[in-house]
Structures are given as C-alpha cells and as structure tokens.
C-alpha cells in the first residue's frame, strides 16, 4: 500500500472515531436530565419533594422547640442562557411553619425561552417531609429576551421530620425545554416528563399553579 493510500485510510479511521465520539456525546447530553434525577436517587444526594395544599398544612402544629436550617441553591444548566439564583441563601425555620423564599431568573439571550426546573432535596431520605405549597417548578417558565422574574417558593417542613436533621438543602436544576434551541446554546433540553410534578412523592393529583 502506498503512503498516500495509508494516509487516506488513516483519515477515514479518524473520521469514524470522531463521529462515534460526537454521537456518544450527543446521546449522553440528551440523557443528562433523567440521569440527573436517577443519580440523585441512587447516590442519596437528593430526593423529590412532596407537594401539599393550604388546607393540608393549615392545622399542622408548629414545633417551636427546635429550628431547621434550610439552604437554597440553583443552577441554569447548559443550553439555558439564564442567570438563576436564590435571593436568600439560607433560612432558619421551625418545623411546621410556612416559609417563603424567592429565586431570581433573568433571560440573558435575545430570544424567548421556555424552561423547566427540576427540584431535589438533601438529605434525600427526608424529601417527603419537605412540602411545597407554591413553586415555579410546578409549571414551565417562559421569559422574553432580557426579562427578569422573581419566582416564589412557599414550603413547610413536616414536624415529623427526624430530630437529628438540622440542615436541609433545596436545589433546582433549570433546563431549556426546546431541543433545537438548547443545542444551539451548547446544551441539551429537559427530557419529556422528567420534571413533571406528577412524579413527585405526594399529592400528584393536584393541579399546578
């Protein structure tokens, strides 16, 4: 085989290898959202929060003998050109009392984007005791170019929570819901149904607000 033929064959092999890598990266990226949730569950670093309504928590007795520190984090994932962060980093509350915090989202792009937030709670084993009455994660959020929005979360920590639990972290991962748009901004969209609140641990039949 001549040197020229060897170069041609080598180039073809290189193209095949690079194509395989590109396909693999795309597949991994497209699966990122469901993998995020599954890894949280498998590794015990987070759990799906519960959902409640005002009537359910109206008669919950507040445990004023102790406090729990709730920490708040949030991240706009690749493909979502938003600024996204909590306006309060942490809050001390009594189990059983209602609390409210706000997150800020700002669309940094020149086009309208629809996104969905995926919540998780750490430690994961107490996630069912973290009950949200109102949350921007219940529905998709659309922001116009340059638009800024303050988004509230109203929640209650169940007084039946383990007394050894002193700190809870509420996290959100925000994903672009449009596949083509997300890829154009260098990321991947949220997989169908991943963030649906019907998958949460409780009260899935109540409509989102």
Image (spheres, rainbow, N blue to C red):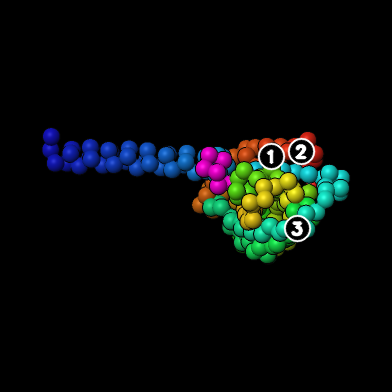
User: Residue drawn at (78%, 54%), measured in percent from left and top?
Assistant: 63
Q: Is residue 2 above or below residue 165?
A: above
Q: Which mark is residue 203?
A: 2
Crowd band around label 2 with a 10 angstrom C-alpha radius: few (<14), some (14–19), many (20+): some
User: Residue drawn at (63%, 49%), measured in percent from left and top?
Assistant: 121
User: Which residues lie in the magenta part?
Assistant: 41-46
User: Residue drawn at (67%, 54%), measured in percent from left and top?
Assistant: 112
* Mark 1 lies on residue: 200
The residue furthest left is: 2
Q: Position of residue 106 (x, y in %)?
A: 66, 62
Q: Is residue 109 above or below residue 125?
A: below
Question: Nearer the viewer's eye, disc 3 or disc 1?
Answer: 3
Q: Which mark is residue 183?
A: none
Q: Nearer the viewer, residue 105 or 73?
A: 73
Report the side of 26 relative to 157 (left or right): left
* Mark 3 lies on residue: 65
Circles 2 and 1, Cβ within 8 Å, touching? The answer is yes
Tag 2 secondary structure: loop
Circles 3 and 1, Cβ within 8 Å, touching? The answer is no
The disc, 2 or 3, on the residue closer to the chain's N-terminal end is 3
Q: Is residue 44 magenta?
A: yes
- Answer yes or no: is residue 146 visible: no
Tag 3 secondary structure: loop
Q: Nearer the viewer, residue 108 or 52?
A: 52
Q: Position of residue 168 (x, y in %)?
A: 64, 54
Instruction: For the N terminus, give its image quadrant.
Output: top left
Instruction: Using the numbered discs, state the Cα–Cα distance from disc 2 to disc 1 in whole angstroms.
Output: 8 Å
């Amino acid at each position: 085989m001549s040197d020229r033929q060897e170069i041609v064959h080598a180039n073809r092999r290189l193209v095949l290898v690079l194509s395989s890598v590109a396909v693999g990266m795309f597949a991994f990226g497209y699966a990122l959202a469901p993998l995020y949730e599954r890894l949280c569950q498998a590794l015990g670093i987070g759990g799906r929060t519960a959902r409640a309504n005002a009537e359910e928590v109206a008669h919950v007795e507040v445990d004023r003998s102790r406090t729990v520190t709730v920490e708040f984090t949030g991240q706009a994932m690749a493909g979502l050109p938003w600024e996204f962060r909590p306006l309060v980093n942490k809050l001390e509350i009594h189990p059983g009392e209602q609390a409210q915090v706000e997150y800020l989202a700002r669309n940094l792009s020149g086009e309208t984007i629809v996104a969905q937030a995926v919540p998780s709670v750490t430690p994961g084993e107490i996630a069912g005791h973290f009950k949200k009455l109102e949350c921007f994660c219940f529905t998709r959020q659309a922001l116009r170019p340059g638009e800024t929005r303050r988004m509230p979360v109203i929640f209650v920590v169940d007084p039946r929570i383990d007394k050894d639990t002193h700190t809870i972290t509420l996290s959100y991962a925000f994903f672009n819901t449009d596949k083509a748009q997300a890829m154009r901004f260098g990321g991947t969209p949220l997989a169908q149904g991943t963030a649906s609140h019907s998958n949460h641990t409780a009260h899935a039949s109540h409509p989102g607000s």
